[in-house]
Image (cartoon, helix red, strand yellow):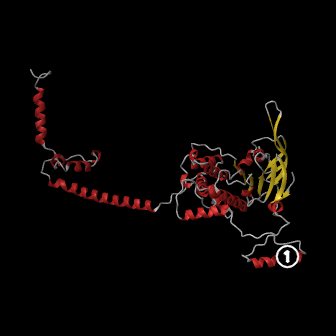
Amino acid sequence: MTDGIKTGGATGKPVVACQNLTKVFRDFWMRNRAKAVDSLTFDIYPREIFGLLGPNGSGKSTAIKVILGLLRPTRGRVAVFNKPPSDVATKKRVGYLPEESYLYPFLNARETLDYYGKLFEIGHATRKRRIDELLDMVGLTHVQHRPIREYSKGMQRRIGLAQALINDPDLLILDEPTTGLDPIGTRQVKDLIIEMGRRGKTVLLSSHLLADVEDCVDRMVILYGGKKRDEGTCDSLLVSHDRTVLETDALDDETIAEIDEVLRRRSGGTKSVRGVSNPRQTLEQKFLTIVAAAQADRLETAGATHGGETASFLKAEEIEGADLISKLTSDDEPAHVPSEADRQKSAARTRKDEEADAASSVIDDLVAESPASTPSGVSGSSGAPASARPVREASKPDRATQPAPKPDDVDDSIIDSLLDGDNAGSDQPEGGKL
């Protein structure tokens, strides 16, 4: 496999190189059952959007699975980033959307993206930021907590596309990405593919819906029966050189007749105006116009929304130092920025604390003044009114910190009465009264 030049002038080694790729499926007795890919040769260069086109059963998905290392080729050679497809180091640089979305039905959209982000060992802060941006981009933010099993097929394709982009891949492989999508989602996938190409990503797009990829691929290979039937750019394959189309403002019949007369006179009667018609918009354009008007009227929908802008980490204008900062902070929780509601709650708690401190100060003053008003010789706690006792008891300092009572504070008559009672009881013999 030799170095090549991508259409458009970029040079470099191919990101994907297939040489005489052949894949034959065999039965239990090792007899050839089907030849899915037959001597397929093509290269995909950096920064290229490459289309692998053909009808169902033409070998597109089989070729993709060989490129991903999911299948072993029967014959031929395949290299991805100049390494064998089985090389594990290349997997971090590849994003893949299969023809059918195989997702865990019991997880919701956020949990699904978080799971795949952890598989790529993406830090917590970066993972959370990318999940938020991808959910907004594919229009699933408002249903991010619903289980995947409750999603329609189109919504599952959207979350499948988001998981293919979670690792910011250098090579994005999309196998029938618009299957099950409505015109809004189809248009969004086209715009995303174009945006990825602008950023310098390499995209391999497989589809049998030719109109879906005609607007975005740089170069394509058309397959049929596992064989390559044609290859080239859109212009080289699709431009017709035997006709000329002129587009002007609306013309009246007299002007059209004069143009036809000039053509016949200049060509000796061999050329003329073949037909005249008014241009019309495509059905896709009409559909998108209706949806845009409905969204402007704020009509509700239970399905996926139009989606937001392309995630910032997928855009070409992303700041180069952002990746370094993300790596340095990937293991840290993102700093919490207090909202207006949080600030109001904090101010309310501060006011309550101040009021509680003021009330405590008043109680302390009352407790400090109460001993002076009690009768002489009566303990402060016993002489206080019943209603004041709980407050004074709660305000008492710890017993361990109280000073020892002075001798003047003790009522001697009470002690003497207790001693007399003990002496009287001591004259009785053991065992109680006689």
Residue in the foreground of this view, choosing between 21 and 394: 21
Residue 132 percent coordinates (x, y): 58, 55
Mark 1: secondary structure: helix
Residue 415 percent coordinates (x, y): 13, 39
Name which residue lies at 77% across and 49% down: 55
Give the image quarter of residue 421: top left
Residue 194 percent coordinates (x, y): 71, 61
Residue in the foreground of this view, choosing between 290 and 360: 290
Say whether residue 322 is left or right of residue 334: right
Say whether residue 156 is left or right of residue 170: left
Q: Amino acid at mark 1?
A: Leu
Give the image quarter of residue 32: top right
Q: Is residue 420 above or below residue 212?
A: above
Say if residue 374 shows up in the picture.
Answer: yes
Residue 427 percent coordinates (x, y): 10, 25
Residue at the spot of label 1: 263
Say whether residue 343 is left or right of residue 20: left
